[in-house]
Structures are given as structure tokens and as C-alpha cells.
Amino acid sequence: MGMLFHASIKIQNIWICFLMAVLMPALSNALDEQATLPGEDILAVAAERQAMLLDIQGPIGPATAEYLINSLEKSTERNAELVIIRMDTPGGLDASTRDIIKAILNSPVPVATFVTPGGARAASAGMYILYASHVAAMSPATNVGAATPVSIIGGESPGKKQGPSENGEDAKPEADTGNTMMRKAVNDSVAYARGLANRNGRNADWAELAVREAASITAEKALEMGVIDLIATDISDLLKQINGRTITVRDRVWVLDTASLEVERLEPDWKAELLGVITSPTVAYLLLLIGIYGLFFEGYNPGAIFPGVIGAICLIIALYAFQMLPVNYAGFALLALGIILMIGEAVVPSFGVLGIGGVISLVIGSIILIDTDIPGLTVSRPLIGALALISSLGLMGIIGIALKARLRPVVSGREQLIGAPGSALTDFYHEGEVFVHSERWSAKSDSPLREGQAVVVTGIDGLTLKVRPADE
């Protein structure tokens, strides 16, 4: 046992010496590299200093929110020093806008929103995002404003007085439910806009004016009134002007250093791209129609499989998209009812009653399906018109087929025997047998008949035919 112990000690010593001989040169090299690391590391970090560029083009919806929120998270993970949102939007959905603003306000990376190029706008939802950003910039020949909630545009301004009363005093605002809802919507938006303005030291009074009266101003006027921080011609000019600017990010003072930032554009990932496609109201509308028609065709042709599978997939995707969009459920119900009525016309022809009602229901339901007037977030009107035209043509074809079928002579059943030719099988005067349609029938006749004489069926009494001679 003692010899074994000493042998193991020697083996361990040999291994220690071997490892030291191998590792000492590597450790020495590492220490040598460590001496030069700080300078090189600074250069590497300096080379990696970057700003992330995000694009908002068109209406703001669930896909836009998904893209911006994910991009802000990626910018934080990559230690970006600035996020630039290049924006041109007519507005968008309130829920998506608020999600984007929450992400901006809670982002540890400064966010600069830049309305560009010339001719671009930050309307409605875009104004709120501009106010929420740490840096707000615009290009020449751009505009901002018109932030009144779309649902109350065209109605009476909340709190508007109705003119003088009979005693010469101003009348009080009407207290009906519609005005109350309008006041609630606009007051909520005003409070939201003023809060964002006060947070970043911008003109809160004009923000309220943009909400209450849908005011809109140019970039030059916005700079003059303190709505934005600067006017820049392009991204390079923006970075140059904000270099050294002091801002507050999550209650922490931040001095921007943008002199040597490399700008990298972040593209939407596959999820945001897919969401952008299916949440388009027109695409979601088509998916809904395909889904409903597919399931109905599968129901009337059990075992076809293909229509049912495709219909179920399209219907589920459409319902997923619609739960992110401002859907009018009355429009949804009218749309489904219209399709059911048109299919009912095809199955049980009513000479147009079901079909015409179905087309009317389909068109009305399609028009009111998406409950917003925001450009780009409505179902395409030409598409609705095309579907209504195709449905009407199909309906006319079904009605034509039904009318032809109604006027066509009977070719089967008891009714078809009336007027059918035949021949007498025996001589008989009152009762006997005849041969009609390759069948032997009992027959009655008021005239005497000879065997083989041609006869014509004039009526049916149970299983007995009434016949007469063909030459009468």
C-alpha cells in the first residue's frame, strides 16, 4: 500500500510539471497581450459605436408596433448609442401607437424621431410618437399635427356651445351620449399629448390644439413654436446637430456623442413581415372569405378534405388578424350572413330572393367591417365592388339555370307518363293491358282497342293508366 501511495504521488508530480510546462508559455503570452489590450479594446469599442435606423412608412398598426418594439430590444442588447426612427405616416391605431410610445419611454437607448424626406408627415399617431421621442427632428417641407381621434372627426367639437339662448346667454353644451363619448375621447388624447410634451419640454399648448382642432404646421413653424428640437436635411446632418445635446433618458441625464456613430438599418424580422401582411385589412378580409367558403364547400362535399383544410387555416389566420384590428362585429355578422344566403341560393334556388339579400348583406358588411377611416387601414373598396359584381353574375347564372330547369319538360316520375305513347297488348274494350315505356301496365279505355294498336296515356289512377287510341 505504501509503495502504491508513493507511486501515485510521483505520477501527480509529473502531471503538474507537464501542465506547468505547457501552460506557462500560454499564460506569458496572455499577460503580454493584456498589456496591449486597453488601447486595442478602446479602438474596437469605438469602431463598434453605432446608431440603429428604423423606418415607419405608412399607417401604424400591429406590425409596426412589433417591428419597433423588437428593434428597440435589439438595440439595447447590442449597446447601441442611439435609435433613429425615420417616419412618414398618416396615423394609425391607438393601441399600436401607445405600445410604441411605452417602448420608447422605457428604452435605455435614446430615441430620435426624424420626419423625412421632404413631403413626409407625422400626422395623428405620428405626432404622439414625435412628442414621446428624446429628440424630435423634421426635414424641410414636412408637416406635423392633425392628431384629433379619427372617430370624432366630422362630429361636433367636444364642448362646443350651441349658440345664444333666448335670454341672450350662451347655451350649455348638449349632454347627449354622443357628445359625452366625443369629449371623453378628445380629453383623453389631450391629456396624453400634454403629458408627453411636458416630459420632453415641448410645446404642450400646441399639442392640445392639434388634438382639439386637428391643427397642423410645417417643420419651420414647429421649430419656432418649440414643437420639435431641430430641422435637418438628412441623417448625417441630424447626427451632426445633436452631437453634445443633453437629454433625459429614464430620469438619467445623457449627453449625446454622435460624432463617429455608424448608422445601421434594422430590417423587420419574419414575424413582423408576416404580421404586416395578414393584418392588412384587405388581406384579412380575403382570408376570411376563403375560410368561410372553404368550410361550406367541405360541408356540402364531405371527404373533399382540401377545401376544409385550406378554409380552416385561412379562417384561423383571419380571426387572429381581426383581433388586432378595430373590427365592427355587426359588419362581421352581415358578411357571414351574406355568404350563407348566397350559398343557400345555390343549394335551394329561390329565384333570387336569398341571393339578392346575400349580395346586399355582403357589400354592407364588407364596407363597415373595419371600424376606422385611417388611410391604409380599410378594406379596399374596388375589391368589395369586384366581389359584389362576381357574386351578382354568379347569382344571375344560378337563377337562369333554375328557370331553365323549371321550363324543361318532365323526364321522370308519374308526371312524365302523361302523353306517353304505347300499344295495346290485347284486344279489349274497357279494361286491359298496354305496353308503355317498356313496361306492362293495366289500362282503361273508353274506346275499343285492338292488339298492337297505338295508344296515348291521358291519366293515371293508382297503378292503372287511362289511355285512348293514338288516332283520336
Image (cartoon, helix red, strand yellow):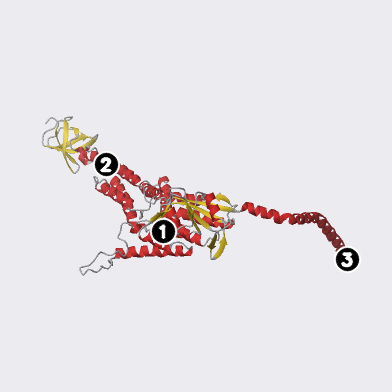
Disc assigned to residue 396: 2
Name the kind of residue labelled 3 in the image. Gly
Compared with 158, 114 (above or below) is above
In the drawing, does residue 465 fall left or right of residue 380?
A: left
Residue 313 position, x and y percent, is 43, 50
Q: Which residue is mark 3?
A: 2
Residue 183 position, x and y percent, is 34, 64
Q: CA distance from mark 1 to mark 2?
A: 43 Å
Q: CA distance from mark 2 to mark 3?
A: 108 Å
Name the kind of residue labelled 2 in the image. Met
- In the depicted view, which residue is nearer to us: 220 or 361? 220
Element under disc 1: helix
Q: Which residue is mark 1?
A: 94
Q: CA distance from mark 1 to mark 3?
A: 83 Å
Crowding at dot 2, Cα within 10 Å, few <14 / some 14-19 / many 20+, comes out as some
Element under disc 3: helix
Name the kind of residue labelled 1 in the image. Asp
Element under disc 2: helix
Q: Which residue occupies 52% across, 57% down?
A: 111
Question: Sequence order check: which comes first, mark 1 or mark 3?
Answer: 3
Residue 367 position, x and y percent, is 32, 51
Q: Which residue occupies 26% across, 39% down?
A: 401
In the drawing, does residue 16 fall left or right of residue 355?
A: right
